[in-house]
Amino acid sequence: MLAPLGLIQALIAFLGAPLLVSVIQRTKAVFAGRRGQPWLQPYFDLWKLLHKSTVFSRTTTSVFALGPILACSAAAVALVFIPLGGWPALISFPGDFLFVAYLLGLIRFFTVSAAMDTGSSFEGMGASREVLFSSLAEPALLLAMATLVAFTHSLSLSGIYAGLGPAAVGPQAFPAVLLAAAALMVVFLAENARIPFDDPNTHLELTMIHEVMVLDHSGPDFAMIQYGACLKIWILGSLVTGVLMPVRSGILIADLAAGVAAMTLLAAATGVVESVMARLRLVRVPQLLVAASILSIIALVLVTR
């Protein structure tokens, strides 16, 4: 089903997604006592990368060249199914939350395939870590969404988040919804390679996960990877904020503004998390992801009992 008003949401997301990265960096700068980068720095970086040439290794094939394009395209397609402010997304159908989960898996598949195509053991190490941690994060995501499906009795993301208003979530359902939101928050940090799972600013061999997979990309290809990462932050962030901060006034402008404000607060909270805690040891990461799945299971049991 097509929702004409969803086009406004999609445009806001496509244009505003890089700004979330800027909010994260500025928040971290405040905690470090620095002035921080300009607010539009992510846009400047993308523009600069688009005007650079692309360098390809002689060992790579078309898999390496197509990886960034297909990953960014999958993120763009997933974005049109994500509602904002409780209003229907541009496209929705029953079961679209599973389709979005598969698209997130495609983003990962194309990125990992491009990394493996370089023939570098360094990038292969990061790819293996990415696949391992993502395989543990997916159950938490799907179980949390199953909890919201059972609570709202809707199979589409637009219907799910439209039914999560303050009036709908009573005292009995609040603990289950809160546990699902906590699991989604863990998935948000893990899938976007943020602390405590990964440090997007590091280049240490023993700690890199996502960044190591994209070291060989350059120019427009790297711009697509960076922009796709911004879209992924918006996609998973919308799933979190739609649960934690549901605002349903019935006025389009007010609800969209509240949704954007919620996304900004989530980005600031991510910056706070990255400023007050260190990255977990690799052996601890699976434990936290399994704990997120357990929270989702408990939430599902509370809703369905």
Image (cartoon, grey):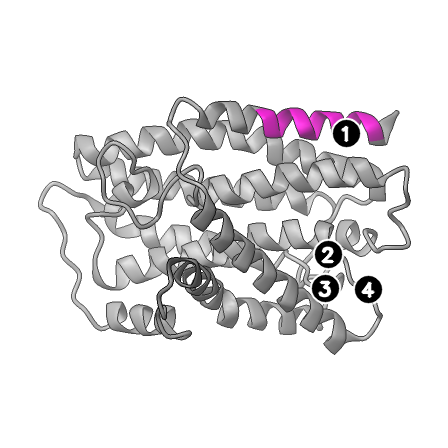
Task: Look at mark 3 in the image and give the residue it sits on.
Answer: 85
Task: Look at mark 4 in the image and give the residue it sits on.
Answer: 248
Give the foreground label among 2 and 4.
2
Give the foreground label among 2 and 3.
2
- Of the residues shown, which amino acid type is indicated by label 4? Arg
Task: Look at mark 1 in the image and give the residue it sits on.
Answer: 300
Label 2, residues with CA under 10 Å away: few <14, some 14-19, many ≥20: some
Bounds of the magenta span? 291-302
Answer with mark 1 or mark 3, whichever residue precedes in sequence. 3
Residue furthest to the left in view is 58
Look at 69% across and 30% down and name the residue there.
Answer: 296
Direction from residue 177 to residue 207 in the image, left or right: left
Relative to the observer, which residue lies in front, 79 or 210? 210
Task: Look at mark 2 in the image and give the residue it sits on.
Answer: 245
Label 4, residues with CA under 10 Å away: few <14, some 14-19, many ≥20: many
Q: Is residue 45 magenta?
A: no
Look at 45% across and 42% down and name the residue there.
Answer: 277
Residue 56: image location, x then y, percent: 14, 52
Look at the magenta stretch and give its main secondary structure: helix
